[in-house]
Image (cartoon, grey):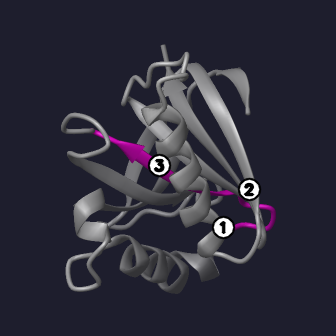
Amino acid sequence: MEIKHLESFTLKGLKARTQNSKEMDATTAKIGDLWALFYQDLGPKLEDGANIYGVYTNYQSDMNGEYDIIACTNGLPNYESAELVEIKVETGKYLLFKGKGEMPEAVISLWGEIWHYFSSEHCVHTRTYTTDFEYYKSDSEIEIYIAIQ
């Protein structure tokens, strides 16, 4: 893991509100359906070379509270629809975690590492719970950026 300072950038995508405890139950989980809808509705409209992101924001409290998840991209510059939301990833300091493997298992595993790291008594960073995001580098490579103080 490494620290990165990022400037803000804006993305467009589809949004859902959820909570980690709800995501553990298939009857209340929303993230899988959100991504399926993203690829079904927006996938065909993406520009060549578009990057795919999952942004987490509007945290109610911490990792246990509700939050918004936006399945989004930088590859829809001229596309508008009623369901599309715009999200700004905040300028700031981020802790970068990297993972590889089969999706979505690689993402789930990497989030487990992140939660473990931040709950460790040896953790020297504090999450800000502003905007965190996943960047899908390829079909088998993920980077997760966690906003820190």
Q: Does the residue at mark 2 contact the one at mark 1 (Cβ under 8 Å)?
A: yes
Q: Percent from the top left, x then y, of residue 42?
A: 53, 75
Amino acid marked by disc 1: Ala
Range of magenta residues: 46-58
| Mark before the other along the chain sequence, 2 or 1 | 2
The alpha-carbon separation of the residues under discs 3 and 2 comes to: 17 Å
Q: Say which of 136 and 47 sits in front.
A: 136
134 in magenta: no
Q: Who's the residue at 43% across and 81% down the image? A: 37
Q: Which residue is mark 2?
A: 99
Amino acid marked by disc 3: Val
Q: Percent from the top left, x then y, of residue 132?
A: 48, 39
Q: Which residue is mark 3?
A: 55
Label 2: element kind? strand
Q: Say which of 134 and 2 sits in front.
A: 2
Q: Which residue is mark 1?
A: 106
The alpha-carbon separation of the residues under discs 2 and 1 comes to: 6 Å
- Count neighbours of disc 1 (C-alpha within 10 A) and say few if under 14, some if 14 to 19, many if 20 or more: some
Q: Percent from the top left, x then y, of residue 103?
A: 65, 75
**Mark nearer the viewer, 3 or 2:** 2
Residue 119 vertical position relative to residue 139 in the rendered view, above or below? above
Amino acid marked by disc 2: Gly
| Mark before the other along the chain sequence, 3 or 2 | 3
- Count neighbours of disc 2 (C-alpha within 10 A) and say few if under 14, some if 14 to 19, many if 20 or more: some
Q: Is residue 45 left or right of residue 137?
A: left
